[in-house]
Image (cartoon, rainbow, N blue to C red):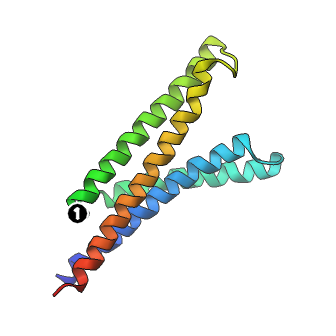
Amino acid sequence: MAHARDDRRIKAGLMAVAGMLGAAGLALLAWSAHGADGAEPSRWLHHAGLISLVHAPVLFLLVGGEALPEGAKRLGRWGCGLIVCGVLLFVATLTLRAACDLPAGHPVAWLTPVGGTLAIAGWLVVAVAGLRGLFAARDSQTRP
């Protein structure tokens, strides 16, 4: 029985790490594109963001949500929904801008960062779901 609880704690902790990596990866890519001071720092931030984003979904898929209590699973599903909505909005607005040659000040362009922000928020919600599962597993371990 103790091994099952330890397994749940490890999986919940890894889900929290996956969420943090996903949020950090998107934030690093945004920083590299919009806020980095120079080509070299921009390249480093870009690589850090890509590495984070490549590994976040891998961890997420490996641990799944089966080890989480129901409340944390529900929260994780909300996080996934935010990620999907954010990525779709981000990709759609960038594609529209490219296909229709829309200027940066066009209202469609204003929606692009909203999509990115929703995706980052989704990854943070996944991280919180993992933390909730981690604390729930820890609390159940201290009960008789």
In the displayed structure, 136 sits above or below 39; it is below
- Locate the C terminus and report the quarter of the image it occupies: bottom left
In the displayed structure, 29 sits above or below 112; it is below
Q: Would you name the residue on which mark 1 appears? A: 69
Residue appearing at x 56%, y 54% in the figure: 24
Q: Position of residue 53 (x, y in %)?
A: 53, 50
Quarter location, residue 130: bottom left
Q: Specify whether 65 is left or right of 118.
A: left
Q: How packed is label 1: few (under 14 Cα within 10 Å), some, or many (20 or more)? A: some
Q: Amino acid at mark 1?
A: Pro
**Front-most of residues 131 and 38:** 131
- Locate the N terminus and report the quarter of the image it occupies: bottom left
Viewer can see residue 11: no
Residue appearing at x 60%, y 49% in the figure: 27
In the displayed structure, 32 sits above or below 63; it is above
Q: Position of residue 80 (x, y in %)?
A: 36, 45
Viewer can see residue 38: yes
Q: Residue furthest right?
A: 38
